């Protein structure tokens, strides 16, 4: 064996250790025991948990498309579909197929068992409800810090049902799915790997990834679904708009904190619970409380 090559391989192995550790924690939990905390992070469990929500959203958009067109589609959904169209891939079922395919592919690569407990799905739902409540408290705390009590001080009640609320309900379900698909499942690993590729230390890479993706998540809420132009130009214009309008500062800060909350959930509790938390929060605040989310 050539000693110089061995040393080179060993150095490369050491340098890649933090990256492999993160990817293993996110994607390759190897313990096959039916442990709840591990099972909830497995791709197959995530898919089983999210599939009813995904079907409800896509069927809901299809049912109301005659009256509202594609306006019920969440912004992240609309943007990703636009990107696929620009690539010549204008298929209605392609984006949900990509999401399902990503989870199935992740599960196959990580060689996880194809079974789960129904109790696990119930636990994931309970965690989603709990974390959504925590996020509501975070919003109230942020509101108090900005001294804008009128923004979130809304009575809790059962609204009179109408088609507009159905549109909102469908859109908010889509936000939980496709915003998390784009900003957490896609953008977080890509950003982390890029930072590690330029030799940013592991801990710093994780922190920067969470903050950067959360800022982008917040800014995305101020970009119109129909906005046209280069992505960098739209981003710069959006930053300038938020900076110049003090009335947007509260919502921007809260959405950034919410993005950091979702990113932390993604790292610690997995993709499925993160989507569930996002969807429950949006539906509760946007349909029951009927306020801006």
Image (cartoon, helix red, strand yellow):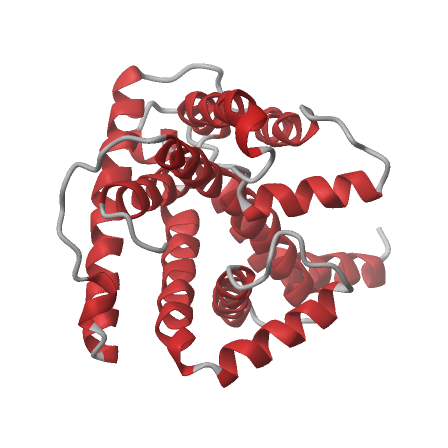
**Whole-percent x, y for residue 254 in the image:** 35, 67
* Vertical side of 147 occupied by 45: above or below: above
In this figure, what is the number of numbered marks? 0
On the image, which quarter does residue 100 sit in?
top right
User: From the viewer's perspective, is 169 left or right of 207?
Assistant: left
**Whole-percent x, y for residue 293 in the image:** 37, 54
Residue depicted at x 58% and y 47%: 76
On the image, which quarter does residue 239 sit in?
bottom right
**Is residue 141 at all visible to an observer of this figure?**
no
**Whole-percent x, y for residue 94 in the image:** 70, 27
**Whole-percent x, y for residue 168 in the image:** 40, 39
Residue depicted at x 52% and y 47%: 179
**Is residue 158 at all visible to an observer of this figure?**
yes
User: From the viewer's perspective, is 126 left or right of 62?
Assistant: left
User: From the viewer's perspective, is 154 left or right of 287?
Assistant: left
* Vertical side of 108 occupied by 139: above or below: below
Residue depicted at x 83% and y 44%: 86
Q: Toward the viewer: 150 or 15?
A: 150
Residue depicted at x 44% and y 55%: 263
* Vertical side of 213 occupied by 41: above or below: above
On the image, which quarter does residue 172 sit in?
top left
Q: Toward the viewer: 163 or 203?
A: 163
């Amino acid at each position: 064996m050539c000693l110089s090559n061995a040393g080179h391989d060993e150095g490369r192995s050491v340098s890649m250790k933090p990256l492999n550790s993160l990817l293993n924690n996110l994607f390759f939990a190897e313990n096959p025991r039916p442990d709840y905390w591990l099972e909830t992070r497995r791709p197959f469990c995530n898919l089983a948990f999210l599939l009813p929500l995904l079907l409800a959203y896509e069927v809901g958009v299809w049912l109301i498309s005659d009256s509202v067109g594609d306006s019920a589609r969440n912004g992240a959904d609309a943007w990703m579909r636009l990107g696929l169209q620009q690539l010549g891939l204008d298929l209605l079922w392609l984006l949900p197929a990509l999401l399902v395919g990503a989870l199935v592919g992740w599960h196959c690569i990580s060689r996880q068992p194809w079974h789960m407990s129904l109790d696990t799905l119930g636990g994931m739902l309970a965690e989603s409800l709990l974390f959504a409540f925590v996020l509501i408290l975070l919003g109230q705390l942020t509101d108090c810090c900005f001294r804008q009590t009128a923004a979130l001080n809304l009575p809790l009640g059962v609204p009179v049902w109408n088609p507009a609320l159905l549109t909102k309900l469908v859109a908010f379900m889509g936000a939980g799915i496709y915003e998390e698909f784009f900003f957490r499942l896609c953008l977080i690993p890509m950003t982390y790997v890029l930072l590690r590729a330029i030799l940013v230390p592991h801990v710093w890479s994780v922190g920067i990834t969470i903050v950067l993706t959360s800022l982008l998540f917040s800014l995305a809420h101020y970009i119109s679904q129909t906005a046209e132009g280069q992505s960098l130009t739209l981003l710069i214009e959006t930053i300038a708009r938020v900076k110049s309008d003090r009335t947007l500062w509260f919502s921007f800060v809260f959405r950034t904190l919410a993005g950091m909350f979702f990113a932390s959930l993604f790292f610690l509790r997995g993709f499925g619970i993160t989507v569930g938390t996002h969807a429950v929060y949006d539906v509760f605040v946007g349909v029951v409380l009927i306020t801006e989310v």
